[in-house]
Image (spheres, rainbow, N blue to C red):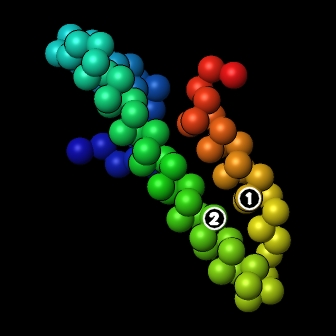
Amino acid sequence: MVKLDHISEGHLEKEKRKLMKKTDGFQIIEYIRSSIEIIMNLKVEDLEREVRARNNGEVSVDRGMDSLNSTNSLVSNPNP
């Protein structure tokens, strides 16, 4: 298993070729959708941490909320 910190372009290209050989278009779309969902969940967790830090008087959350709004608009309207 490849650790996330050590993923290179070569690893990504190998995974891409493997997916294209084994899967049809619908499966690739589902793979991408689930990847986006995972990324969105990580982003929400990050924003929640920023909000907790802000409530403790450490950092401003405005930057994080702008990022969440931008990300949400991309997910809800992928072709602006």
Residue at image coords 35%, 48%: 3
15 relative to 80 in the view: left or right = left
- Compared to residue 57, the image places residue 25 above or below, namely above
The residue sitting at 51% across, 49% down in the picture is 40
Q: Residue furthest bottom?
A: 56
**Foreground residue, 14 or 47?**
47
- Contact between marks 1 and 2 (CB within 8 A): the answer is yes
Q: Residues within 10 Å of mark 2 (few under 14, many from 20)?
A: some
Of residues 8 and 71, the one nearer the viewer is 71
At which x and y percent is residue 8? 45, 32
Say the numbered circle drawn on residue 57.
none
Which residue lies under the disc numbered 2?
47
Three-letter amino acid code at the position of disc 1: Met
Q: Height in image: 76 above or below 59? A: above
Q: In this picture, is 42 found above or below 22?
A: below
Number of dots carrying numbers = 2
- Location of residue 22 in the rendering, given as x and y in whole percent from the top left corner: 17, 15
The quarter of the displayed image where residue 51 is located: bottom right
Neighbour tally class for label 1: few under 14, some 14-19, many 20 plus, Cα within 10 Å: some
Q: Is residue 15 visible?
A: yes
Question: What label sits on residue 65 in the rendered view?
Answer: 1
